[in-house]
Image: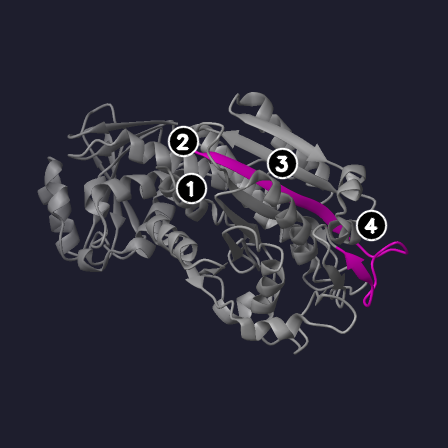
Amino acid sequence: MKFNFSPTVSAKQDTLLVPIFSDNNSSLEKLACHQAIQALIDAQQISTAKGEVTAYFFEQQKVLLLGAGKKSELNENRLQSLIESAVKATKTQAQHVAIFVDALVPKSRDINWTLTQVSQYWVSNLYAYDTTKSKKESATKTTQITFISATENEKAVQLGYAIAQGMNITKELGNLPSNICTPTYLAEHALALSKNNSQFSCEVLGADEMYALGMHSFLSVSKGSDEPEKLIVLKYQGAQSNEAPHILVGKGITFDSGGISLKPGAGMEEMKYDMGGAASVLGTMNTLALLTPKINVIAIIAAAENMPSARASKPGDVITSMNGKTIEIINTDAEGRLVLADALTYAERFEPASVVDIATLTGAVIVGLGSHPTAVYANDDALSKELLDAGLEAWDRGWPMPLWENYEEEITTPFADLRNTGNVGRAGGSITAAMFLKAFAEKYTWAHLDIAGTAWTSGKNMASTGRPVPMLTHYLLNKIK
């Protein structure tokens, strides 16, 4: 898709997208027909209700009037929904869309932020899953978007486009069924990215290599499955080789049956999304490939399948992790923290500037926070603030969570150094999971994002959201010196 800028309307633009408000329509003045349109708005023959789209034809040009409610109430959430409505109205109808973007700036933002967000929302809303359908989605007709604006900022648009592309890759990986998107499939995706981009390199470790490293925590999860486990190490070098890397660690459980602690059957099909952390990390790395920022980033993806079998781990088993800590497995459905434990230890060898793990780790976080913010845990207040600020900047928000020492006693056991679930039942389940991970991230600055509530939506319109690629991208870009 091609993006460009123009301060005025041109006859080459076959479709004009013009936001209209109930209290302020100064942007209409750029149209020769603005008085006629305003008269129809005043007569309530054209609706300014949020998301309502009305077509108006003038001199061979189609004007789509996008109802946006009150201008004084335009905020980030409304902008998202307005662009979603605009894409639905244009993607199979308009080849060249000109957007009156100056009218879409929320009251607390500026035009540069808005250009990034509109580009991101537009391209991410073009994604539709049809890979395993016999009938494919209608092709997107739109090939060009022009921003009608007094401001021209190509970098802002490029950022939004790159984030959207990363989000769409994340969505696709998440939406694929687990018989296609296996640990091997994730590894192949990472290898393909490294082959197509000179700034990337990739190494994939299998069971033998992991066994030699002492990754028995990781291997305790995958041994019940016939799908081979993979530890994927994807490196992006955009800065000098001696600059310490920032590491993203993604949980990649491509299907989570719960193992011997079997999940209920109802809704288990959603457990293909338990690799949402890995998907978001790969999506972010694809975004970096487009932006080529001057930073070093390493993605470590712990990919496995958690299945019940005669070989599977059992409640009460004790295993030894890569860093030597022993773990009593209380619940085999608390498997994500077991693969992440060894992945976090593996990250030590790179002497990282920071480590952030991303995981669909606990259902408990959904009980506490719902589906709007990502839970942010960190062993460093500055890192926590950086992630939270990046989330606000990207409008992919997080919420700070505690890692108080009071919770440490809740993951103690008389039979090992740690237990993999809290000993007070479900209370504080997201926190005790984060406390467990903290024990394996003692040698560097670390944060944990629990995205179980934000990585996908449930119900009739079940789908991957592409989050938290925007937060991660802004976080990494803000790290550049």
Q: Residue furthest right?
A: 310
| SS for dot 4 | loop
Amino acid under disc 4: Lys
Residue located beneath label 1 in the image: 476
Circles 2 and 1 in contact, beta carbons < 8 Å: yes
| SS for dot 3 | strand
Q: Quadrant of residue 118?
A: top left
Q: Residues within 10 Å of mark 1 (few under 14, many from 20)?
A: many
Residue 197 in percent (x, y) is at: 53, 23
| SS for dot 1 | helix
* Residue 223: assigned label: 4
Comes first in the chain, label 1 or label 3: 3
Residue located beneath label 2 in the image: 293
The magenta span reads 295-320
Amino acid under disc 3: Val
Residue located beneath label 3 in the image: 233
Residue 329 in percent (x, y) is at: 76, 64
* Residue 261: assigned label: none
